[in-house]
Amino acid sequence: MMPGSTKNEAMVSLVLNIRDGDSHASFSLEAEPHRTVLDLLERLRAGGGVVPAYRHSCHHGSCGTCGAIINGLEALMCLTTAGDLASARPRLPGGPAVEPETDGQGAVVVTLEPLARMDVISGIAVVPGRVFAGIPGEAVYLAAVENAGRSPLPADPEGARAEGGCKPDAAVWRPAGRVRFEACIECGLCVSACPVAVPFIGPAALAAVNREREKRPETAAAMLALAAAPDGVGPCGRHLACSRVCPQAVYPGKHIQMLRNALGAAARHAAGMSAD
Ligand code: SF4
Ligand code: FES
């Protein structure tokens, strides 16, 4: 039994493989089914194990820092339990649930990888700058009141993407001048899970663009111009991987569809105007 175990319940045997550069660090352990992957990493560290780097803060699904690819599926480590991993579970967003892989002794094999499309700091710790990279500078609905004294993002979208939009604020790990999106915890699971392989500002950014359009109608034309850009809604193939992995029910895929609907309505309106 691991240090800190308290419950008298059937234990789950696990082999935890944690990405560390070009290889994995492996740990064999026993855990109660309710223990989360993050609990297990913490216990390994407390027990003196040399554990590859990982990020976390809140331990309860609200800070968005502990995302990882857990046996092929983007998830928060603080919300994924040993019991989940010992049960049938999808191996990719929207895929069928499959029985867990086990080693020769019946231990469940769990592999932790860093989120895709992010810069890896070390181990499975990433800088989530890609989550923010496409958010336009003029999306002031998302601007931080408490950050009002800081340098604003460049006004032009291209500049925002190239310079400010993906530059993390050293103190809070998000771009200066930005607070949380509604509901979104900026975990980046959607960005990692999205299979689009061409330039694309991504599901989290497009959800933010749509929220800006809804909340501040005076920005609707500018937001729709961003959505209509080559890296806007066009590359989205409606895979819905983003909505399937989002732990906060933001449903980025829904926001992308709302932008498409609004673009269609604007095009019909323009066609009607030109026919008059
Ligand atoms: S939209 Fe959902 S999955 Fe994407 S960053 Fe926000 S909370 Fe995470
Ligand atoms: S530690 Fe905060 S969301 Fe997992």
Image (spheres, rainbow, N blue to C red):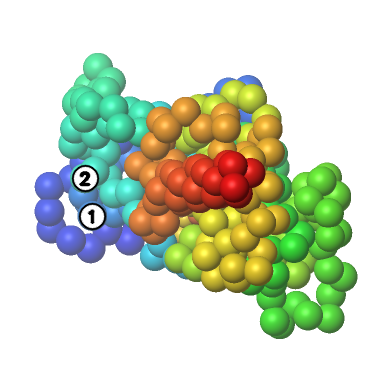
Relative horizontal placement of residue 206, taking residue 8 as reference (left or right)? right
The amino acid marked with disc number 1 is His
The amino acid marked with disc number 2 is Gly
Name the secondary structure under disc 2.
helix
Q: Position of residue 256 (x, y in %)?
A: 49, 45
Q: Is residue 11 visible?
A: yes
Query: Neighbour class for label 2 at 10 Å: few (<14), some, many (≥20)?
Result: some
User: Which residue corresponds to mark 1?
Assistant: 34
167 versus 103 height, above or below: below
127 versus 145 height, above or below: above
Q: Tell me the residue at 33%/49% (across/down).
A: 80
- The front one of 148 and 170 is 148
The reply to whether the C-beta atoms of the residues labelled 2 and 1 are less than 8 Å apart is yes
Q: Position of residue 245 (x, y in %)?
A: 39, 43
Q: Tell me the residue at 40%/48% (across/down).
A: 254
User: Which residue corresponds to mark 2?
Assistant: 83
Relative horizontal placement of residue 109, taking residue 159 as reference (left or right)? left
Residue pushed farthest left? 9
236 versus 159 height, above or below: above
265 versus 214 height, above or below: above
Q: Position of residue 238 (x, y in %)?
A: 42, 32
- The front one of 41 and 101 is 101
Quarter of the image where one finds residue 249: bottom left
- The front one of 190 and 274 is 274
